[in-house]
Amino acid sequence: MSLKKEEILAQNTGKQRKSRATTWLTPVAMLPLFGVVAAFGFAPGTQPEHVDIRHVVEQISLPLPSAQASPDTQNYWREERIRPGDTVAAILLRLGVDDPEAVNFLLQARSVRSLYRLIPGRSIRAITTNQGRLVELSYINGDGKQLLVNRTDDGFEAAEQVPQFEPRVMQSSGTINYSLFGATDAAGLHENVAIQIAEIFSSDIDFSRDLRQGDSFTVIYEANYAEGEFIGVGRVIAAEFTNQGRSHRAVYFQDGEGRGGYYDPEGKNVRKAFLRSPLAFSRITSRYTTARFHPVLRKWRAHRGIDYGAPTGTPVRATASGSVSFAGIKGGYGKLITLRHANGYGTRYAHLSRFGQGIRNGARVEQGQIIGYVGKTGLASGPHLHYEFLVNGNQRNPLKLALPPGPPITAARRDAFDATAKPLLSRLDLLKDTNLALLD
């Protein structure tokens, strides 16, 4: 069948329109691939505005070094990290010190002896000229003091000073496998943190016999830094210790008169009036009993105290504040200290090797103060501490007594305590939850 001219023209026109439409839609379909480019497209017929570009060149004059300035007057700070096995000579070489006079002083002067106890990881800083002459040297030694060496008109001089340090708040946690010291060491904590944790909770936990595998701790403490160097641990400001499934919490609070202590979230004093043990870490070798075979006398008799086995020289702490009623030698007790406390309480510490500084009759002592050192004087078969607890002059078993609590936060200080404690308790919660999540 033949087609009319009008139909043929209409079909061609339709195909042409279809072809144009397809050609026009192709770039649109590509927009997802080139969306960034399409965003800067121009509408048809748009004329971009002409931008006038100019190059500007300016002459800048730089100050020239003085012709009279000696190159040896230009000083430079240098710093070197101490490596294991380093010597003073090796570090001076890396610092670029080429100064026989300085090297001779640093190797011979008695005032720089702390420089020979190099601590790997710490830094030594020096100011030198570009000719290698030493101008100044600085080192934070093992005692946390800053050794400063300076060049003077008469040679060199050295002195130690307490550096300005910045406290940083640090936090950590750990789990007990064998001991508290082992757990804190595994967590990368300084041993002083372990000692403070033990002291804080010593009224409720005897760290020589109460620890169990799986016990855990969380601690927030201050670390002191000087010139970027860690120089020691400050105070523990909040801690939590979970012992045999029971959680103990403590926050440090200092009142307006400068007196500080540790309290639980309810404001109760964490420390009782008496510590659980006169030794921070030890073991019980003989308990309170009415019949024990005496190892020296070789006969049965009552043992109305607790014996703690420990090496000679182990520090002995006063379990409560009080005054010294006796300090001397007394029969089988050997070197003995007897303390008088409030409300008719008393304590005895026997077989000591020596007394602590300032311990004499009538002297005042504070809870936790070192009053003596473990020994084996008197009737003792080996070094240990014999500890007795007295109530109105009568010996009692301290492991079975309900010890009186310390003074709590007063109502007048409650708001100030809450303002200090709540943020720290929240941090303990966060740190504990994070640790549990990691264990899961």
Image (cartoon, rainbow, N blue to C red):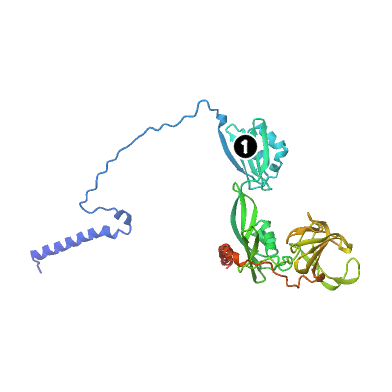
Residue 257 vs 393, above or below: the answer is above
Q: Position of residue 394 (x, y in %)?
A: 82, 71
Q: Nearer the viewer, residue 131 or 138?
A: 138
The residue lying at 88 percent from left, 68 percent from top is 294
Q: Which residue is mark 1?
A: 136
Q: Nearer the viewer, residue 118 or 46?
A: 118
Q: Position of residue 368 (x, y in %)?
A: 73, 61
Labels in figure, total? 1
Q: Residues within 10 Å of mark 1 (few under 14, many from 20)?
A: some
Q: Position of residue 101 (x, y in %)?
A: 67, 32
| Residue 59 appears left or right of 243 | left
| Residue 43 appears left or right of 148 | left
Residue 254 vs 128, above or below: the answer is below
Q: Position of residue 325 (x, y in %)?
A: 81, 62
Q: Which residue, as the protein is rendered here, is positioned at the far right?
A: 298
Tell me which corner region of the image, top left, top right, bottom left or bottom right, holds residue 135: top right
Tell me which corner region of the image, top left, top right, bottom left or bottom right, holds residue 24: bottom left
Residue 218 in view of the camera: no
Q: Secondary structure at mark 1?
A: strand
Quadrant into which the N terminus falls: bottom left
Look at label 1 and name its amino acid: Glu
Q: Which residue, as the protein is rendered here, is positioned at the far top?
A: 68
The residue lying at 71 percent from left, 70 percent from top is 404
Tell me which corner region of the image, top left, top right, bottom left or bottom right, holds residue 36: bottom left
The residue lying at 83 percent from left, 70 percent from top is 304
Q: Nearer the viewer, residue 122 or 424?
A: 424
Residue 126 in view of the camera: yes
Quadrant into which the C terminus falls: bottom right
